[in-house]
Amino acid sequence: MKFSVDKEVILNGLKIVERATVPKGLQPVLANVLIESVSADTLKLSATSFDLTVVTNINCQVEQEGKITLPAKRLSDIVSRLGNAPVNFEINEDNIAVITSGKSKFDIIGISAAEFPVIEDELTEGETIEIEMKPFVTCAKMTSFAAAGYETNNLLSGVICSINDKILEMASTDGNRLARAKEFVKNDENKDFSMIVPSKILSEFIRMTSYVEDENVTISKEKSRIIFKTGTTKLISRLMEGQYPKYNQLIPTSFGKQALVNRDKLISALEIVSTMIDEKTSIVKFEFTDGVLKMNADTPDAGASEDKIEISYSGEDLLIAFNYRYLLDFLKIAEVEEVLIQMNTNLSAAVLRPKSEEDYLYLIMPVQLRV
């Protein structure tokens, strides 16, 4: 096998697929990227962990056809350090890749492509829908962070995605918080589409889209598998099965207390107060009064911290406590100037949303304070 490729082209291709590798798995070949020629000017790069598979095509000049698997991380490290000259690859019968660029030369030991798992990157049946990339990525960013940890092998580690008419809605919850986002999409065929995607997979899709420029994404699903496809790239994953909780029933419809807070000032105050946080609980107490929000934290045998910011507040005074990490997760995602915090009691769910924004909300359960 012999080919030549521009540095940035193969580097971007490697960045797209390498997160699907398994660096320290039982099968060494899963730490590698499969490189195979498709035509005289196209290479296909593939990587898989079985849970996640990513395939992308890149432009190159193929002199001799073939395929090989090479260590993804080492290859990416090498290419990233090269100059801007074309990168030349020549693979011999012993699966050794000789890489040259300018005056640089590397010999990398690969593994035969025959040992790489067979990748099925097409569905024989199921449903398919094509929507715009931007609203899909926006909703995914606004919700995937609130799902349960990936080690939780149940539906709460997934994100529910549904498309009805021209509304895309995504939501996730870990039992202590809930994020829900809505965006308009074209959906010219007026299809209804629903799926539960592992949050880790959505996070990888978000990261992958920073390396592609496509305006649309095609989503195909069957009973247990899903494929996200852009112009040159496919992300393949398992699909979660089951009945997702009826999350909209958890969202209060009215509130007796409401605060309008500057987002940046709230982030700054939380980060200051958190210096004295009890790491076992991550609790920050919030005291809402007319015009002022006071926050404080304390750690037994260590000390306490306090900070105040000006707010616009309506309702009776309220002392309530939250896991500050949950708040920061939302605040750093919501890139707005002001955040609306709506509450009822110190034991009932609070809802945060960007000011004048009905399509995105974040529900968080308070922590019960010990008297």
Image (cartoon, grey):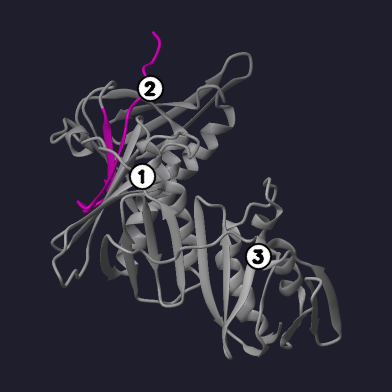
Q: Mark 2, residues whose alpha carbon is within 10 Å: few (<14), some, or many (≥20)?
A: many
| Amino acid type at image mark 3 | Ala
User: In this view of the protein, can residue 202 be seen by the observer?
Assistant: no
Residue 112 or 327: which is nearer the viewer?
Answer: 112
Residue 328 or 260: which is nearer the viewer?
Answer: 328
Mark in front: 2 vs 3: 3
| Amino acid type at image mark 2 | Val
Residue 312 appears left or right of 286: left
Range of the magenta residues? 349-371
Quadrant assignment for the N terminus: bottom right
**Marks 2,3: beta carbons within 8 A:** no
Q: CA distance from mark 1 to mark 2?
A: 30 Å
Asked which secondary structure carries label 2, the reply is loop
Q: Mark 1, residues whose alpha carbon is within 10 Å: few (<14), some, or many (≥20)?
A: many
Mark in front: 3 vs 1: 3
Q: CA distance from mark 3 to mark 1?
A: 30 Å
Q: Mark 3, residues whose alpha carbon is within 10 Å: few (<14), some, or many (≥20)?
A: few
Residue under label 2, please give it.
367
Mark in front: 1 vs 2: 1
Percent coordinates x, y for residue 221 in the rendering = 31, 58
Residue 12 or 241: which is nearer the viewer?
Answer: 241
Residue under label 3, please give it.
114
Percent coordinates x, y for residue 23 in the rendering = 68, 52
**Marks 3,1: beta carbons within 8 A:** no
Q: Is residue 358 magenta?
A: yes
| Amino acid type at image mark 1 | Met
Q: Earlier in the sequence, mark 1 or mark 2?
A: 1
Residue under label 1, please give it.
240
Q: What residue is at 33 percent from the left and 64 percent from the top?
A: 124
Residue 85 versus residue 190 in the image, above or below: below
